[in-house]
Structures are given as structure tokens and as C-alpha cells.
Image (tube, rainbow, N blue to C red):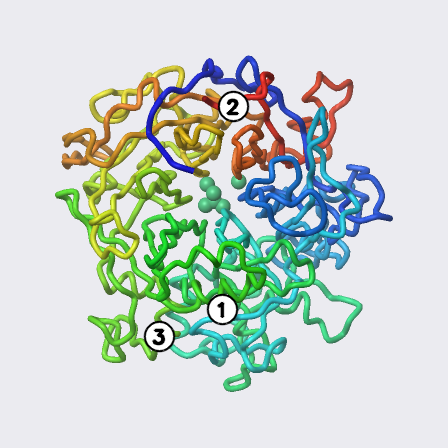
Amino acid sequence: TSVTVSPARLDFTAVPKSLADVVAVPAGYSLTVLYRLGDPIASGVGAYANDGSDTNFARRAGDHHDGMSYFGLAATGSTPDANGNTRGLLVLNHENITQAYLHPNGATSIGGAIGAGGVRPESEALKEMECHGVSVIEISRSATAWSYVPASALNRRITPLTPMSFSGPVRGNALLRTRYSTDGTAGRGTINNCANGTMPWHTYLTNEENWAGYFRRQFGDVAARGGSTAKQNVSLARYGIRETANATTFNGNYGWASVVPADAANTLYARWNVTTTAATDATGDFRNEAFQYGWVVEIDPFDPASTPRKRTALGRMNHEGCEIGRAIAGVKPAFYMGDDAQNEYIYKFVSATPWSAADATATNRLAIGDKYLDAGTLYVAKLNADGSGQWLPLVFGQGPLTSANTTYPFADQADVLINARLAGDVLGATKMDRPEWTAVNPATGEMYCTLTNNSSRTAANVDASNPRAYTDPKTTGGQTTGNANGHVIRLRETGDTSEATAFTWDIYAFGAGSDLDATNINLSGLDATNDFSSPDGLWFGLPSNPTGNVTPVMWIETDDGAYTDVTNCMLLAAIPGRVGDGGTRAVTSTLGGTSNTVTTRIGKAPATTLRRFLVGPKECEITGIHSTPDGRSLFVNIQHPGENGGPTNITSSWPANQAGAVATPSRPRSSTIVITKNDGGIIGL
Ligand code: FEO
Ligand code: CA
Ligand code: CA
Ligand code: CA
């Protein structure tokens, strides 16, 4: 497909901001609810009762639908078809759970609160674990509508219990040795899978984000934190493993470590307790379980029997997503990643191997993954005030990444990758306002990254690329200070090549209510048709069509933030320009009695090239987006509607109420929807 950047025109009427408990799309569009929490994906699994009594989530849709890719299938069988528009595999992450709705009367815990001393019933904990992970489902389009195939042999659930293998430089490292894998080559499961990546060789990347919160670490159990070395303590702390020092045990977010299971060996629940109990035996306890997580994981969705591979060359962090840039024959491809926590970094991995177009149709897909994802260079981004930037290599032995480093003495390349955050610290990478999704414009190769918000950004530490700190006048619904509304940054590689080690950057758009100060907050001049807060999901659609003359559309999804008192979360469509199409701008931050002015670099005001396309139901996040290759069916995930309620306080009845109000409240369900245009056209254009 040849690509042009014109005609640059969105062709739909903006959807108004809304607090209604329903998904709204523009006039002329329709939506179908395709795949809901609990929907059965194997024969013999009953319909979802949705009253907390359901079990067997290893054969049902999980919760909190997140990042998602559509892979076309040939008319029959399990062969990929890059032009398949009516039959495909939909692969999606189940990031987390709304715990209260999964049980008849909410979650229970005996003898203390969940996560603080109580004991969880095994059946509840198993259900909660299995509601995490990934779904692979076969979907097809009939003359009238899309549906999933409940008994397809291609359907699969991947959960925190699914066997995985490690590949890349960290495979076999001492920190991966556990009771489950005494040689450090295998892993068990994946968790808190946030955004995704769609590889041109037809595999799916799922990314482990907020895994640290699932673990208990009670150093008060043993003197001086048992067998952890001082170095390991630095690492565990840098990655947010919470410690408790006394009997008020923190048992992890959901208390899974507290379960006293029927199986006395207890390898499923005790592994969430990484407290060390002995000085030397790393394979007899669970001290290294936390090092099993924080990776990019590759899945071959076309082979349900395949073992997913954790790609350690891409580093360990709160991986939000991992998206490949343009794959150009003879050029080493780049993979762009955000580490989503406050003041963390943007990374890219450049393969050691140049792209070969023949690999797109290879049948040994995970071996192709080995070729591009196991060897290469991981870089972290430094953004300068003058609009330039550098990719700093995370290579052991280069610069400060040596055993002589006093902040953190690195032992080898595996140590650098396991502790990518510490490597970024000593290299002086730029601390960003929570890097979420990345996306690459297929027409230009420019990389966009959402910086969702940052309540710890102060007026004193604003910089050119994170230039705002203020108090949002909105008073409810999430964050109100610091960079309360987030922004979308973009960068252009020097020479427009994925192999570059330098770039230029600017800020595509700043989130803000349209009523906020146009001088220092609503810098992009957003109006009622496109004002937003907390950008998160990000994806470029590149519809193919017979003329080969199509405009890439960038889709922006939002998550909570400082605007939920005015509107539910939303999806916007954009036709962005180029890095450098705007200019510089002085921005004054005023917060906590401090004022500070920095000069930022801001793209041309989006105006009519950015427009709200969808608004979701109550208490949801809009996340996960992909389309068929022809751009005529758009898949979107509605995550955690009604997340603040529970069985006796149902705060959203979506999706049961999508077709019309329900007589009695119905427990909400995270769901995938598919949107089509009533005239059959390309979505958004
Ligand atoms: Fe899972 Fe950073 O969102
Ligand atoms: Ca996210
Ligand atoms: Ca988010
Ligand atoms: Ca969420």
C-alpha cells in the first residue's frame, strides 16, 4: 500500500462529552458488543451467569480488556491472511480485575482485610488469577454482523498459570532461578498485561505493567531481609516492590499469598510472597518470582499449543506497550516502549538484524521473533530543551554501566536489562510524565507516545518536554495537580531511520479542558469537539483500499484523569502533522506557591484534525484498539465500567443497557465492541 498524507480530513460529527452509562458513536455509525467478561470460549462451558457464581475462567473471557490486535485469517484453517477482513483472530489483554463483581457478595477474606493480614479463599484467588492474562479468539463477519466463535479450536486463554519460556540475554540468569524453574529458563504466567504490539510476522506482544503490586515482601520475617543481597534490595525498591516490616502483613493487592491451598506444596499462591527466608537457597523459596515479571512477552496466536516467550533483550520495567516502527527491507527495525510510572523513561530496542520482507510470511513465527527480538541494542531517551534528543545505549561496559558504578554496580548485560530503570538513572535519561502507549505514523516513521499525567510534576522540576505543573480546577474524578491532563509527545529519528541514535521532538497536543487557561494549560487550543484528559491508548490505523491512497489516522484513548466529573473516557481520531510544524512556546507553571517558566516545543494546533469519536459508559477506561486491514471494522475495548461499585452498589449496567435501559441493575462487564459505518466505509474518513 502506498501512503499519502492527504486528503487530510476527518469526516464525522464530533461526539459530545457525556456522563451517560452507554457507548456513544457518531451519527452514521453502529456498534456491536462482541466479547464480554465471562463469555465462554470452549464447548461445554456454560453461559455467564454474571452473579459471582461463575468459575473456569481459563475457558472464559477474562476481565479488564486492554491492548488488542486483529490478525486476518484465511477463509478456512489457521493460516494468516494479511488482507483478511471477514475472519480473524482477535488477541487482547486482560490487565486487571474489578474484584467485587467476580464473587457473589464481593471478595471475602478471613481474619483481616484483603492485602493486610486476611486469608483469602482458594477458589476466589484462583478465579481472580485466571481473570488476568490474554485471550485469543476466532471472530468472523457474516452478512449482518461480527461475532466470536465460542468453540473454535483456535481459542485460547493465557493466564498467570500458563507455562512460558525465557529468551534473550537474561535466560538462565541466577535471578530467574525459582522453585518452578531451577535453571532459570522457564516462567509461569504473565500478569497485568497492558498494551500490545502487532508484529509483521503475525505474532502478538503482550506487556507486563503493574506487576509489582501483586507481591508481598515482609522483611520483618527475617533479620536484615533474609537472603537478599544489598544490590537486590536496591533493585526491588527501585521497581516498587512494597515492603512491610511487621505483622500487619501486606499480602499483595489481592492477598493471593495468604491462601492456604488444598495442595500442600502450594506453588500457586506462595509464589506471590517474595520474602526471603534463607540466606542461600534461591530454588527452594520464591524470592526471585518478582524477576519473572516486567517483560515483553511474544505469543504466536495461530498456534494454540505454542509456549509464549519472554523477550528479555527489551529490558524489564513497567512495560506499557511495545510497538514496532516501519519494517523496511535491509534496515534494522525499532521497537518503542514506555515505562508507565511517574518520572520514568521512554525506550527503544533496535534489532541486530535488518528486516527481511520474506519473514512476514514465515510459518515458524516464534523463531522469527528470536531473530528480531533476542539480539540488539536497548536505548533510553534523553530529550533536550532545544528540541534535540539522544538514544542512550543500555550496554554493559559502556559509559557508567560498569561494576565500578557507585549507584548500582552492574555485573553484566543481564544485570543491565533486569535493572533497566537503574541503568536509565545513571545514564541521565529524561524523567517523563508517565509514558504510556507508543505508536508510529506509517507515512512518516515518526513515533508518538502518550504521557498520561503526573501528580508528582512540580513547578520546580518542569522541563521542556514535560512543561506543565498546575492545579486543574476540576475537583473530582482523579488527579488534579501536577501535569493533571497529560500530553502526547512525538519524535522524528535523525535521517528518518529506525537505526538512528538521535532525534528531534515536539509535543503533538496537550490535554486540557477547553475552558482552561489558554496561555499556560490549554496550549493546543482544544475546543468542545476535541478536549480530553489523560491520553493513554494510541494507535495508527492504515486502512488499505483499492486506490492505495489513504490517510493514516491516529486514535487516542483516555483513562480517568482530571476530566471525569465532566465526561466519561473517550476515543478521539486525529490526522497529525509533522514534528516541528509548530514552534516554541513559553509556559509558566504555578503550583504550591512556586512559579517557573520553561520554553517547550509545540506542534501546530490540531483544530479540526482532532475530533472526539466515541464516549464510553460510567467509570470506564477506553483502551485497546485495532481494525481490519480495510479500516472498515474498528475494534475497541471498554475497560472496567462501573469499577467503583460492587454487588450491592452497581454503578454501571453496561453493556446490558447498551440497547436500552435495563429494569434492574446488571453487573457491568469489560467488553470488546466492534464499530462499523452504516454505509460500509472506512472508519473516521
Ligand atoms: Fe495499564 Fe499504564 O496503563
Ligand atoms: Ca494504559
Ligand atoms: Ca492509564
Ligand atoms: Ca484501567
Name the residue nearer the viewer: 7 or 258: 7
Q: Secondary structure at mark 2?
A: strand
**Mark linked to residue 413:** 3
The earlier-in-sequence mark between 3 and 2 is 3
CA gap, disc 3 and disc 2: 45 Å
What amino acid is at disc 3?
A: Gln
Residue under label 2 = 614
Q: Would you say 205 lies left or right of 63 here?
A: left
Q: Is residue 217 visible?
A: no
On-image quarter of the N terminus? top left
Q: Farthest residue in the bottom direction? A: 280
Q: Callout 3: few (<14), some (14-19), or many (20+) C-alpha neighbours within 10 Å?
A: some
Kind of residue sitting beneath label 2: Leu
The three-letter amino acid code for the residue at tag 1 is Phe
Question: From the viewer's perspective, is residue 91 above or below residue 637?
Answer: below
Q: Is residue 196 above or below residue 442?
A: below
Q: Nearer the viewer, residue 381 or 586?
A: 381
